[in-house]
Image (tube, coloured by chain):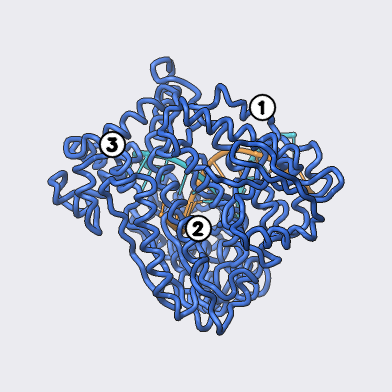
Chain colours: A blue, B orange, C cyan
Amino acid sequence: MSTRWCVVGYAASGSVALTDVGADGTVVRTTDCSPEALPEAVRRRESQGGPRWVWSDTSAWYPQLLAAGVRVERCHDLRLAHAILARTAAVHAHARVVEDARWEAGPASAASAHSPESGGTLFDYMGHGGASGVVPHDSGSALAEFARHRAALEEAASHGGLPAGRLRLLLAAESAGGLIAEELRCAGIPWDAAEHDRILEADLGPRPPAGAHPARMHAVAEEVRAALGDPRADLDSPVKLLRALRRAGIPVSSTSQWELREHDHPAVEPLLRYKKLARLLTANGWTWMDAWVREGRYRPVYVPGGVVTGRWASTGGGALQIPRQLRPALRADPGWRLVSADVAQLEPRVLAAMAGDAAMARAASGADLYAGIVAAGAVASREEAKIAVLGAMYGGTTGASGRLVPRLRRTFPDAMAMVDRAAALGERGDRVSTWLGRTSPSGRLRLEDAETERERREAREQGRFTRNFIVQGTAAEWALAWMALLRSRLAALPETEEAPAEASGPVFSRRAHLAFFLHDEVIVHAPADQAEAAAEAVRACAAEAGRLLFGSAPVDFPLDLRVAERSES
DNA sequence: ACACGGAGCGCG
DNA sequence: AAAGCGCGCTCCGTGT
């Protein structure tokens, strides 16, 4: 094995120590450089086929490198890897990964979002840390933690429960995710503020002065009040609105749209319209645009591994909740294109693959898995297939879901056995693991010990959580692999000569790069003459991700892919 | 003055 | 209060 590692961390003097570690774990040599000289040192090593960089936290080290025009090919993120290894049932007991609690800290990116330099000051890296702080950034701590990770991996490979290599793959993918999250923020989502403004004006009317409601909203509110016969009804407070609705004779128990829709009253239609407008204004209105869109880019803060299942979270601008209504505001720079791709029905496909369910894999062999399930004779319609599949993965027990899931159990026994077993373990308070070995937290109680109805309900909730965990978590792993492969493939495309996208930053202004990620969907921003090559890379990497995780399992991951100037119209 | 939880709704 | 998972954000109302 010719793996070369280079551990990056601060030395006591305030300089940065670069420690090369050989495949057997011994230190080969150590060199020092000033923090200012780090980007150049990293660039030099990368140009000679770089090492795998080992550092405390990608969100603390990588932004400065990207700002200096330096991209790295691969890394081992100690914080992200620790979070996985410290909870991995197979290695927990012997590897002592948990012995240094400072590695339990959260990401640095939120804190350093507005000052890239603050990633490693004397205050951060010497001795502090802990659950609420920042992981240690010094060289000694990094070397010690890295040694624990290698020991844990070796133990997992020798007598862990998982096939050797999966955990290693998970850590590599998770670390690549750390790199990608920072690169996504650096490049940003190309955002057409003028189009965003047009969408807002079309629905809300002209931008009002600060603090005031837009004219259109005001008019709709008046419609609602007139229909209620209540000229002073407050539409913005759920409690007051609920009282006003009941006074007007609408017997609702909440003000949510799904319940309002059930009632035939002249106030309902304008009220639903009002709620839509209020939501658009408060969540993604002009204030949001002012705060988050600069120089034609929206730069979201992604949090890799931010969800227990391994999915990413985001913080700040709500990157993972951009309403579809605003999708036309995602727009390529002049001379560039957006390559948008999402996977159709990713989670059930992942379930079919991990369970090795041949019948379900056959149903998943076309572009529409739900149609395949109808063709397999499990249910009568596509709509029923959808409800049954969601019920199987989420633990539906009542209504149409409760009626249809048993039919799935007959047709796809292996896939259903897998999720049913995960649910049974969760109900016992036990932990479950994803395909690559991310482990769920343990439950608080066991169904068989539950004495009150409340406890029984909670135990069943644990079961629904673990049922979903193995599927959602493995789907997140597939998506990480897809992106990690794609990231490398895009970096190998030639740079463009014309119309650089300056706002994407020095690393990405001349080459195709990832611009957006949302669980099962990516958008690549590519020079127009490379859009087709980028699209082909997106497709190839989806197929490759399937093989990387599941080997020869005969499950397709078909993409819905478009190349256009806008993400959608 | 600020913290926090719930309601509601956006995304997958 | 979605029948069934996972999130973040904004607002309101209450508690301190």
> At which x and y percent is residue A267?
41, 61
**Is residue A216 visible to the viewer in this orientation of the structure?**
no
Q: Which of marks 2 and 3 is in front?
A: 2
Q: Earlier in the sequence, mark 1 or mark 2?
A: 1
Amino acid, disc 3: Thr
Q: How many marks?
A: 3
Callout 2: SS: helix
Residue A277 at x, y = what percent?
A: 50, 66
Kindly identify the residue that appears in the image at 55 percent across and 45 percent down: A2
Compared to residue A556, the image places residue A136 above or below, namely above
CA distance separating discs 2 and 3: 29 Å
Q: Do labels 1 and 3 share a chain?
A: yes
Q: Mark 3 lies on which chain?
A: A
- Label 1 element class: helix
> Considering the numbered disc 3 on the image, is that residue within a helix, a strand or a loop?
loop
The residue identified by callout 3 is A398
Q: Which of pointers 1 and 3 indicates the residue nearer the eye?
A: 1
Please report the residue visible at 28 percent of the width from the left and 36 percent of the height from the top.
A398
Answer with left or right where residue A412 lies relative to residue A34. Answer: left
- Which residue matches tag 1? A99
Residue A327 location in percent, x, y? 46, 69
From the image, tell me which residue sits under label 2. Answer: A321
Mark 1 and mark 3 lie on one chain; the one further toward the N terminus is: 1
Residue situated furthest right in the rendering: A13
> Is A264 displayed left or right of A272 in the figure?
left
